[in-house]
Image: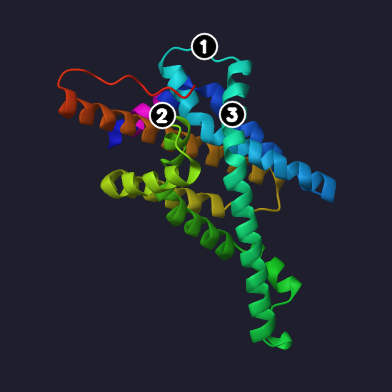
């Protein structure tokens, strides 16, 4: 398994431009939203950022194929995958909004007003180390099985929900890789949670760290998936290797 991560790190170094773009996008997302207009722009920006992240496996494959990456081709791939994300993204946001409203109604109905946490308590909890660590660990444990989603989405051109399902299935069949991803994510959570949120430079450092680790994991997952496909193809068709999937 270690050799996959070594190859993944080398792959990321070859794809430095993708990492640089990811860092810039993450840094821009740290800018606070002060009004509704900026909030709406931030919503569109978030969708574009997710579209870029979902496009990274296809862009990495272009680098493998020695295809010259230009801003035009990069934007074309990102725009195409962002457009594919819009319907499921809006559905997810709507579902989340409904869940939040239902939860709020339940809290208001069940918990007496004098027992509800105040705004200051919520702010204090959000800024504490324990809360940051808890959120980071929860994210690491729940997101790790979906590490292959963007591969199925942008390389195999599956729908988002089908890609998520196939990612879960692939992770279940390759528990050694999944456990290594979980271990890396947990270690990252321990380090990143220790950085204070009140200092802008630490927030930027956290973003830089997260983007690098995420890209290494994604590159490693892509290499692992490609090797798995080749082995399956060899078992089925003898000596003929499969072509790399096209995302165009």
Neighbours of disc 1 within 10 Å: few (<14), some (14-19), many (20+): few
Query: In x, y percent, where is residue 195?
Result: 59, 51
Q: Residue at x 56, y 22 (%)?
A: 17
Q: Earlier in the sequence, mark 2 or mark 3?
A: 2
Q: Which residue is mark 3?
A: 80
Coordinates of residue 28 in the picture (x, y in percent): 71, 37
Specify which label sits upstream in the sequence, 2 or 1.
Answer: 2
Name the spot of residue 99 as percent of width and height, x first.
61, 66
Mark 2 → mark 3, Cα distance in angstroms: 27 Å
Quadrant the N terminus occupies: top left
For mark 3, give the secondary structure: helix
Marks 2,3: beta carbons within 8 A: no
For marks 3 and 1, give the CA distance: 18 Å
Q: Main secondary structure of the magenta part?
A: helix
Considering depth in this image, is 40 or 13 the residue closer to the camera? 40
The part of the chain drawn in magenta is 5-10
- Secondary-structure class at tag 2: helix
Q: Residue at x 41, y 15 (%)?
A: 65
**Disc 3 or disc 1, which is closer to the eye?**
3
Q: Which residue is mark 1?
A: 68
Image-quadrant location for residue 21: top right
Q: Nearer the viewer, mark 2 or mark 1?
A: 1
Q: Which mark is residue 9?
A: 2
Q: Is residue 236 visible?
A: yes
Report helix, strand or loop for mark 1: loop
Q: Is residue 150 left or right of residue 242?
A: right
């Amino acid at each position: 398994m270690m050799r996959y991560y070594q190859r993944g790190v080398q792959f990321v170094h070859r794809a430095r431009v993708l990492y640089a773009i990811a860092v810039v996008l993450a840094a821009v997302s740290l800018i606070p939203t002060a009004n509704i207009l900026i909030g709406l722009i931030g919503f569109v920006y978030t969708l574009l950022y997710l579209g870029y992240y979902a496009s990274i496996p296809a862009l990495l494959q272009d680098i493998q194929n020695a295809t010259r990456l230009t801003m035009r081709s990069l934007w074309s791939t990102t725009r195409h995958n962002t457009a594919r994300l819009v319907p499921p993204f809006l559905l997810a946001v709507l579902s989340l909004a409904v869940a939040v409203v239902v939860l709020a109604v339940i809290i208001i109905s069940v918990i007496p007003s004098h027992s509800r946490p105040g705004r200051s308590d919520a702010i204090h909890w959000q800024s504490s180390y324990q809360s940051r660590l808890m959120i980071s660990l929860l994210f690491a444990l729940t997101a790790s099985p979906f590490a292959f989603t963007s591969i199925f989405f942008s390389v195999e051109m599956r729908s988002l929900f089908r890609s998520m399902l196939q990612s879960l299935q692939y992770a279940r069949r390759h528990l050694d890789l999944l456990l290594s991803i979980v271990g890396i994510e947990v270690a990252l959570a321990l380090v990143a949670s220790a950085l204070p949120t009140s200092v802008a430079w630490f927030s930027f450092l956290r973003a830089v760290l997260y983007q690098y680790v995420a890209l290494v994991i994604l590159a490693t997952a892509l290499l692992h998936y490609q090797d798995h496909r080749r082995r399956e193809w060899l078992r089925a068709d003898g000596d003929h290797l499969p072509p790399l999937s096209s995302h165009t």
